[in-house]
Image (cartoon, rainbow, N blue to C red):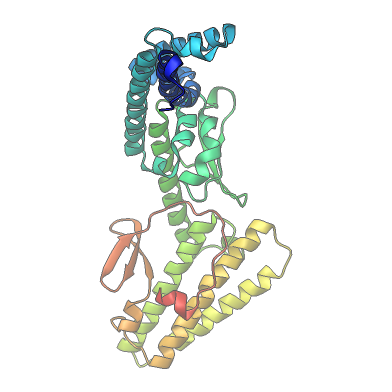
Amino acid sequence: ASRFVGGIRQEVEEWEIKLGLLSDTLDEWLACQRSWMYLENIFSAEDIQKQLPAEATKFMKIDKFFKDRMRKCNASPNVIEQVTAPKLLDTFVDANKQLDEIQKSLEDYLETKRSAFARFYFLSNDELLEILSQTRDPHAVQPHLMKCFDAVKKLTFGDGDDAHVMTALNSAEGEVVPFSSPPIAEGAVEHWLLAMQDAMVSTLHESSRACLEALQSMAKEDWYFAFPAAPVIMVGCIEWTLGVEAALVKMRETSEKDALAGFNRDWIDCIGGMVELVRTQLPPLHRKILAAKLVIDVHARDTVETMLNMGISWVNDFEWQRQLRYYWEADVDDCIIRQTNTRFRYGYEYLGNSMRLVVTPLTDKC
């Protein structure tokens, strides 16, 4: 302590106490202000108040105290006078404790929503709260769909009395896939998003089955564009798998040793037909479908050529077994994907009408 403080020691000690109180109070005040600013926007939404009534009641009391204190500061902007108000520090400490409890309850609430609809884990707390604060408006979810569903840019809703009926998926490329059984956006948002997800899967499953059935009856030039891009790509993979296996069985059971080479020639002719088609005047979406299918079909051609060079002649040879093979199995009425001893169902996640990366030997190994 300074040797010159002797005559004013009592006053200095009083100011030291006041300034210490000022520092502690301002720390608590600012912490309260930060939490209040974050939660005020959340609990001003009527939907959140209804879903978290106890937390909303707590926050309203703190909101009333904080606004009242700020009004008093505005009326008398004297910092010492304000921070020395009776029990102000204790009140802010208690308010911050309650705000922490409210935020913990809020995080637990968001976790229950994410547990109900796992794709919500792709959203930040603020994004999820933006959706939950507008549950009566199904369009509030539209800006966040791309984070939940990789290729769903928006949903098409009906008009008038059908305003809550979801009629179609829309990709970023502009592809529109109507739902086979349109779901309804009613009730908790996580529930109707689950219903939309189920409708997406069932729609693509039905479209894939129809695409497979039409493969034998439609001209290829029409078939390419009669269905969404994903079923066309998938059924094309089934066609290739069945063609290669039929050729390998023929080589094994008959004397037709060039069956696989004959299949590959037909496959190359099919690729040539697509190349001719893609050079014509086509809408952008049609051109993208052909471009994606060409990438996959060219890789399929290269795979068969490798098998021919290796002298593969039976379906149980490892070089064929290690390939990703698509089948439509009648007993489960579904697309099954196999590779060596692995077997799993096709997922029917909507992929839009996106481009495909060129498959190289390195990416094939990956």
Q: Nearer the viewer, residue 202 or 70?
A: 70
In the image, is residue 211 above or below residue 190?
below
Quadrant showing the C terminus:
bottom left
Q: Residue at x 56, y 66 (%)?
A: 292
**Relative to the observer, which residue lies in front, 348 or 93?**
93
Spot occupied by residue 242 in the image (x, y as percentages of width and height): 39, 73
Residue closer to the observer: 174 or 68 = 68
Q: Nearer the viewer, residue 115 or 187?
A: 115
Q: Specify the farthest residue to the right.
A: 281
- Quadrant of the drawing holding the N terminus: top left
**Does residue 364 sit above or below 171 in this rendering?**
below
- Left or right, 298 with respect to 114, comes to right
| Residue 201 can be seen in this image | yes
In the displayed structure, 238 sits above or below 348; it is below
Please tell me which residue is depicted at 37% across the width and 58% down the height of the picture.
Answer: 346
In this rendering, the count of numbered labels is 0
Report x, y in % for residue 228. Answer: 54, 54
State left or right for residue 71 relative to residue 241: right
Residue 102: give x, y in percent of width and height: 35, 23
Q: Is residue 259 left or right of residue 331?
A: right
Task: Examine the image and state in which quarter residue 291 appears.
Answer: bottom right
Question: Relative to 93, does residue 353 appear above or below in the rendering?
Answer: below
| Res. 135 in view | no
The answer to which quarter of the image holds residue 186 is top left
Q: Position of residue 43 (x, y in %)?
A: 45, 20
Residue placed at 43% from the left, 8% from the top?
85
